[in-house]
Image (tube, rainbow, N blue to C red):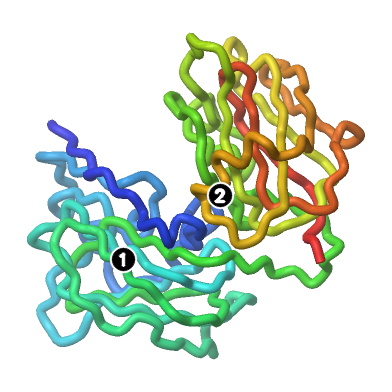
Amino acid sequence: MATLLAPSFELPAHLQQYSNLADPRIGTKVLECSDDFFAEAQRMLQFNPPIFVEDKFDDHGKWMDGWETRRKRHAGYDWAIVKLGVAGKITAFDIDTTFFTGNYPASASIEACYAPNGDLSNALWQPILDNSVLGPSQHHIFDIKNSAVFTHVRLNIFPDGGIARFRVYGEVQIQIQDRQRTLDLLALENGGRVIAYSDAHFGHPRNLINPNRGINMGDGWETKRRRAPGFDWCILALGQSGVIEKIEIDTAHFKGNFPAQVSIQAIYIENATDPQLIPQSMFWPFLLNAQDMQMDHIHDYVADILKHEKISHIRVNMIPDGGISRIRLWGKIAE
């Protein structure tokens, strides 16, 4: 039973600075849908790219990695209401029909609303993507010009069919009343994101900002064994610029492959492109000088943090190589 992997896809450069507001790792879920006879709607939100398993069938028919409705035999269309993991300003959608070749929708439209209390009974839905033509087995990027903040979206597919993956890219809007509240400013749910890295052979640095502790070594950033001088590094953008009060470096599950030391450099910079940050990061001042690491341990730093008025980006140096599960930057949003 052969398994086909989705073709590689690189997000357009103008969207790489934005977060996927519909990432299931931060609590995104399908609240309701008109139909998901062939494949449950929640499946289209999965983080990993879709796959196609030849000759895999279930009680409803061919197994598909995405959301798929039955063939409609009357007027109408199918829909799914998605609660975003975080409120945000939506910049673009990616409606991906990979592996849906004879069963993709003819078109799709999207509405959105702001309902922070979760009550949709009186929500004001507004169209933000007009009915747009879809094609077989491909990504469809739709840029959105709307400055409103939304918490829910409704994906409408005409008349029926399947969607492999659904992404909602935008700017995270943290919904807090008290700006003196301490937050993990690097967390995925607060808009943190990876910009660049030296190596990710065994585990991607995007795992560093996932919620909760790592579940195993695969749920962390791990590089290949270094056979040349130097060290590994990754650059991350904070979701919100702020003043750092506490740093956590967690090597959970890394026992024979934790780094000897870790240091962190930091900077506050506005309107910088991701490519320009990479060479400049070598010269950023340190936020945390090199610290010895232990296996499978949460390392907390408060007094060792070097003074910065505020920061927006960090560079994590993993010396010389190895694996880290999580990094937390606890602090307050800068005024």
In the rendered view, would you say 291 is above or below 130? above
Q: Is mark 2 on a helix, strand or loop?
A: strand
In the picture, the disc for residue 193 is: 2
Quarter of the view holding residue 210: top right
Q: Which of 309 and 257 is in front in this view?
A: 309
User: Which residue is located at x 60 percent, y 44 percent?
Assistant: 236
In the picture, the disc for residue 141 is: 1
User: Which residue is located at x 59 percent, y 10 percent?
Assistant: 256
Which residue type carries mark 2? Arg
Q: How many C-alpha atoms fall within 10 Å of the one at disc 1: few (<14), some, or many (≥20)? A: some
Residue 44, how many percent across, how many down?
33, 57
In the rendered view, would you say 254 is above or below 74? above
User: Which residue is located at x 75 percent, y 35 percent?
Assistant: 248
Query: Is 198 positioned to the left or the right of 77 in the image?
Result: right
In the rendered view, would you say 149 is above or below 202? below
Q: Is mark 1 on a helix, strand or loop?
A: strand
Q: How many C-alpha atoms fall within 10 Å of the one at disc 2: few (<14), some, or many (≥20)? A: many
Q: Distance between the residues labelled 1 and 2?
A: 20 Å
Quarter of the view holding residue 285: top right
Q: Which of marks 1 and 2 is nearer the N terminus?
A: 1
